[in-house]
Amino acid sequence: MAREGHACKYKCFIVFIGFSVVLSLLYFATHKDVQGAATFLSNSLSTRLYPFHSINPRVQEPFYVGDGYLGSLEDEAEEELRAGGQSQDSVSLVEQSNVSFEELQTSSLSASFNYATNDVLVFLHIQKTGGTTFERYLVRQLDLPVPCKCQPKRKRCLCSRPQDSNSSKKSSWLFSRFSTGWNCGLHSDWTELVVSGCVDRYFDNREKGHSKRRYFITTFLREPVARFISEFRHVQRGATWQSSTHMCNGRPPTVEELPPCFEPSVGWTGVTLDDFIGCKSNLAFNRQTRMLADLTTVHCYNESAMANDLRRTVLVRSAKRNLMKMAFFGLQEEMRKSQYLFEKTFGLRFNKPMVDMEPQTSPDDFSPEERRRIADVNQLDIEVYNFAKEVFHRRFELARSSDPLFEVNMAT
């Protein structure tokens, strides 16, 4: 009986391929377009052989491609992710209680974000991606029955739950720079915020006890070459982020694992592009990938513990996977669309529209050779960003197509 089932399965598969070939040939004969016929055939077969790459308004992460079609390096990277991943017993409460965008779309209304319950919106702030603008909007422009309380000339706002706004209970629905501060480290990454469980411990300490919470993790990304240039200019003006701890597996990296690019007492003000790119341990390289990935899967900052090609592959796959675990991510180049997608995802509204940001420094200010060098040291970010951009645009189109008041909502 099983053999008959397998035989039927393979016969159906052969018929499917044959049918696709016939349609492709008909297309070619009708349109005299070899490339179009090849594309049609490729898309038809890829939907069967590579189901995670099929055209789907809800993009799924392309980890497993067909049956046995992964290359050896990708296969090894997946094994590293599994081996480096935590068991269910050791996964942090933040990750266990994380709500993804996909879950928000497919679950009942009970999965929606509710700031009056134990839901917490967490913002992972990657440098020079428009995060400061978005965080200010979260605390100052979000239209809530009980908005955050922001005092003039103070960087912190009190974002209490409505039932606690007039009490001494220190609950908060927002974990971000302008609400709670850098309580998991300056510009803390996925490893510090989520993998370590820091966010949950912070709220336990703040609220004097443990509560079962749900976490909605968000972030912003930016085109990698433009982001790198913006960080370079920021460092030229004197920024260093020296107080970032880069905690991973319970400890910061050693000096051998992360050699400093400059003398801490002197800083790096006025650094040239050659020197900025010349420091091999510069954390500006592929910053978005590193901050999105689970660094415990690559032995944290110990680059000698794993072959470089494998390490890079694991980082990219981990970053993509964690992006898909998030409830929302936006793009700095698409601030207005990002605002709309956030509002549709969370069922919230801002009282002021965002505007697409004009960069202070353009990549066009740099020569083609300089831009090429910058791209070379940000290849992982380029791959992750291209993936994120595709996911973002499909999510936006899905939201737009289901919104009968799209034009009105985008205009206000």
Image (tube, rainbow, N blue to C red):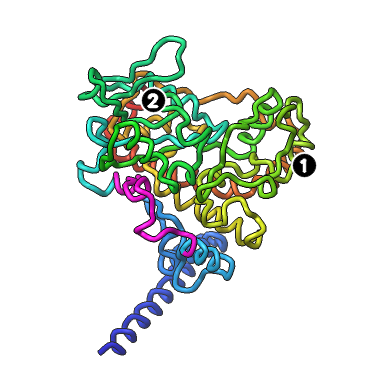
Neighbours of disc 1 within 10 Å: few (<14), some (14-19), many (20+): few
Occupied quadrant, residue 328: top left
Q: Is residue 185 above or below residue 54?
A: above
Taking depth in this image into account, of 350 and 182 the one nearest to the observer is: 182
Q: Is residue 81 magenta?
A: no
At x 49% / y 46%, what residue is drawn? Answer: 191
Residue drawn 51% across and 61% down? 39
Above or below 377: residue 408: above
Tag 2: amino acid: Leu
Q: Nearer the viewer, residue 385 or 251?
A: 251
Where residue 278 is drawn, which disc sits there?
1
Q: Earlier in the sequence, mark 2 or mark 1?
A: 2
Pinpoint residue 376: horizontal percent, then vertical percent: 70, 47
Instruction: Classify residue 43 as left or right of residue 108.
Output: right
Q: Is residue 307 left or right of residue 74?
A: right
Label 1: element kind: helix
- Separation of disc 2 and disc 1 at Cα? 37 Å
Q: Residue at point 20% right, 24% down? A: 163
| Residue picked out by circle 2 | 138
Residue nearest the observer in this picture, 391 or 305: 305
* Residue 91, magenta (yes or no): yes
Q: Is residue 273 visible?
A: yes
The answer to which image quadrant residue 15 occupies is bottom left
Residue range (magenta)? 83-104
The quadrant of the rendering that contains the C terminus is: top left
Q: Residues within 10 Å of mark 2 (few under 14, many from 20)?
A: many
